[in-house]
Amino acid sequence: MGQQTLTREPAVAQPPAGRIASVKKRVSGLRLLDLFALRDYRWLWLGTLAFFMGLNMQMVARAWLVLRLVDDSPLALSMVMGSFALPVILVSPFGGALADRIPRKHMLIVGQTVTVVVTAGVATLDLTGHITFWHLMATGFINGSTMAVNMPSRQVLISDIVPESRLMNAIAMANSGMNLTRVLGPAVAGVLIIYIGTSGVFYLVAGMYLLAVLTTAMLRVRPAPRAPSGVGMVGDIRAGLSYAAGNPVLLGLIVMAFMPVMFGMSYYALLPAWAREALDVGPDNLGYLMMAMGAGALAGTLLLAGARNFNRRGMLLLITCALWGLSLGGFAKTTSYAAAVPLLLATGLCSSIFMSLNMTLLQFYSSPEMRGRVMSIAMMTFGLMPLSAMPFGALAEIESVGTANALLLSGMLLTAFTLIFAIVYAPFRRMA
């Protein structure tokens, strides 16, 4: 590979953006919270917060409703999770192509409006006693499809709004809002189910999604017009895949995005079983463990959001990925609650820094007309999360292995593959 340093390819020249360009110039050197001086960023951040608060509340309400409908079947629960995840894999490429064709603001409004209607429909079916397992499977597929279409647009809108010198901070701040909802959403939903039932929570979630629609409608961003490609939707998708595969920087970043999904996300599915086996905790202490993980993720994104621009971001990406695996393996083998909490904090912190920085670099190294399609490839990794946890779940079922050893193997594989990638692809360590 030689000793060259990976640098960003020149961006395609774009016509002046007038008022937005002047705002970008004024905020290019501002501090963390001064990102909110950008009117459009402020509305986008609030919309993202409302959307993911609803999403995290819905996950708890949907899981509780599934278990009620099918007599606590874990298989049924995983099927409903899969109905949401599968479209993320299948539909994301189309979402990315649409994000490079249609104004991203309009994409978000339409997709979020569909989510409002579907969620309100589930609430009404639940309230009237007509809800069935297959309703949840069908609506899970619809919600997963709209998520796959919306996420590339939501991510790329940030680069339409903020100056490139603050892109890392802006993406990390947006992810901070998402991680805050990971801490608050499940706890709020769990308490509200006791008082207003799952139907009431679904109606409240629909209201959060509607709030996201209204805040998105407040955006005034006017991205530069894009000329039609003339090759159709499938041609756009092929062009995006070829572009990413032919760019060694982007290809490396995509490989790095896949590794944690395959080996580092197992704790999402296995944490409850591990906590019962290793620590014999009840639901309250399990909740505190999950909150510790979310708090670590929030701290990580806030640290990255407040960081000044720095070089060797490729090295930071490799380090946080390797530490993610080590902290995962560390808490897997602990038998002390006091030791598990800081290790889960570290896992959440490393994983959130890695994911925010990876998303930043994918946009930074993509040309503007390809960003939607590049981000859609990265979004596909999230659909693999439930599938990637299955092999480690199967290992955990083997009595001679157990959950702790399955999680340890998961963490060690993540660290090992990160080190192998760092050695094989040496220029990645010197990425600016």
Image (cartoon, grey):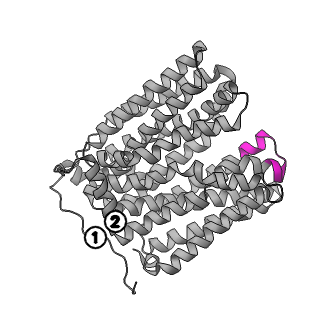
- Helix, strand or loop at mark 2: loop
Could you say where residue 342 lies in the image, as x and y percent from the top left? Answer: 71, 59
Query: Would residue 336 be counted in the magenta stretch?
Result: no
Say if residue 30 shows up in the picture. no
Q: Residue at x 22, y 45 (%)?
A: 222
Earlier sequence position, callout 1 versus callout 2: 1
- Quadrant into which the C terminus falls: bottom left
Give the quarter of the image for residue 73. top right
Q: Nearer the viewer, residue 52 or 240?
A: 240
The answer to whether residue 59 is left or right of residue 29 is right
Question: Going 27% across and 55% down the picture, which residue do you hit?
Answer: 24
Res. 8 image quadrant: bottom left
Mark 2 residue type: Tyr
**Mark seen at residue 9:** 1
Amino acid at the residue labelled 1: Glu
- SS for tag 1? loop
Q: Which residue is mark 2?
A: 365
Prevailing SS of the magenta stretch:
helix
Distance in Å between CA atoms under marks 1 and 2:
7 Å
Position of residue 30 measured from the top left corner of the image (x, y, whole percent)? 36, 58
User: Does residue 283 belong to the magenta stretch?
Assistant: yes
**Residue at x 46% of width, y 48% of height:** 89
- Dot 1 crowding, Cα within 10 Å, few <14, some 14–19, many 20+: few
Q: Is residue 426 above or below residue 154?
A: below
- Residue drawn where x is 44% and y is 40% of the image: 147
Q: Are marks 1 and 2 in contact (CB under 8 Å)?
A: yes
If the image is split into quadrants, where does the N terminus sit?
bottom left
* Residue at the extreme bottom of the image, as rendered: 2
Along the viewing direction, whichever of 195 and 99 lies nearer the viewer:
99
Q: Which residues are magenta?
A: 276-288
